Amino acid sequence: MKTRAFFIALLLFFAMGTPGTGRSQPKEQLGTVNFPNSCSVAVQETFQRAVAMLHSFRYGEAERTFREVLAQDPSCVITTWGIAAILMSNPLTGIGSSKEWAERAQAAIDQGRKSGAKTQRERDYIETVGAYYEDWSNRPERTRQANRARAFEALAARYPADDEAQIFYALYLAATQSLSDQTYATYLTSAAILEKEFAKYPDHPGVAHYLIHSYDAAPIAPKGVPAARRYASIAPAAPHALHMPSHIFTRVGAWPDSAATNERAAIAAKRDKDVDEQLHAMDYMVYAYLQLARDDSARRVIDEAVVASGLSYNRFAAPYALSAIPRATSSSGASGSRPRSSSR
């Protein structure tokens, strides 16, 4: 009995975690992250879950979760970085934050500066994400992207042992890749950083996710297959994680895999009432079904997309998908050759 009690106590000890090393295994499967922080023990699991959501672009839920942590532990000021980070929207699209989201993000940054994070590292994270929003209304998105990448490069250099800093730098660097550069040098530089992290953290949602983005070009897409095969199983609770493998599957012609993973993504997004993500997955699903000459399946998805189009959405993904799907169906026969745009 004493031995059994000892092991129960040991399990409880490791489950509780400690401030600064809050590795978590949340109820929803979102992957494993370990973002060191100075927040209280009570909020560690929730904070790590919010960071995991950030890595899988789970926009609304991530922002709400960061705000819940801050409400529960007002000293957890690093959450203001998380709020500002998720409000940048998908950093790889070249569109960036909306005016409303940018204002919310700046308010969070201002709150973080006023409250004062406990550690210099946390203060640096807040200032680093602030580089993107500085003079936001007067700068084009390309300038904001470049400023963000430079700021996170400096953060990663300042904290070389901080894996999260390296991972976020790789993401924001990849966002500056010019599609006119057919050497994909920037993508490959990001991928080199992430491959090292992937070897250390095979269950990290951001690493697998950003590797897919860093290989999202036809000549280098085969390099992204391992991450594509892994990501959906790392974070199946995140609709975007279920969709992202299809960026690589589409590039390499793995049409059954693309259709299947987007089917799961659309179902998960509908469950979350995320119309943008649902329609985005449907767009890729239709394209995959057309390549397989499964016209009836493609028409079924189109009909479902028409229904979903009447719901409200918050980002560019939904209108993009709605404009793309008709183009896919206008291709002759069942093998539309419409090229997939990168980094969506």
Image (cartoon, helix red, strand yellow):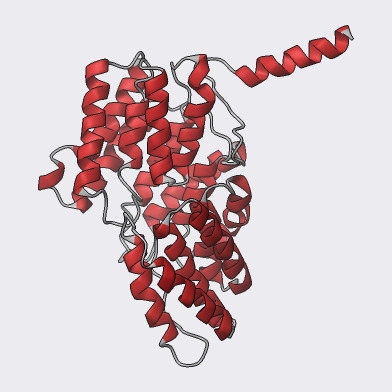
From the viewer's side, name the closer residue of 42 and 115: 42
Q: Residue 160 at x, y = what percent?
A: 43, 28
Res. 157 visible in picture: no
Q: In which quarter of the image is residue 229?
A: bottom right
Q: Please determine whether, in this image, residue 266 is positioned above or below residue 299.
A: above
Extreme-right residue of the structure:
1
Pinpoint residue 159: horizontal percent, then vertical percent.
40, 25
Find residue 206 and report its horizontal and vertical position in percent: 49, 43
Q: Between residue 281 and residue 341, name the one nearer to us.
A: 281
Q: Is residue 84 above or below residue 245?
A: above
Rendered residue at 87%/10% (across/down): 3
Q: Is residue 344 left or right of residue 301?
A: left
- On-image quarter of the C terminus: bottom left
Where residue 276 sits in the image (x, y, percent)? 39, 59
Residue 13's place in the image compared with 314, above or below, is above
When the figure is inspected, residue 212 is found, relative to residue 295, above or below; the finding is above
Q: Residue furthest bottom?
A: 332
Quarter of image, res 185: bottom left
Say whether residue 76 is visible.
yes
**Number of marks in picture:** 0
State the residue in front, 292 or 26: 26
Q: Which residue is drawn at 44% across and 46% down?
A: 58
Relative horizontal placement of residue 244, taking residue 105 as reference (left or right): right
Q: Could you tell whether 138 is left or right of 324 in the image?
A: left
In terms of depth relative to the viewer, which is nearer, 296 or 192?
Answer: 296
Q: Residue furthest left?
A: 138
Where is the N terminus found, in terms of image quarters?
A: top right
Residue at image coords 31%, 54%: 314
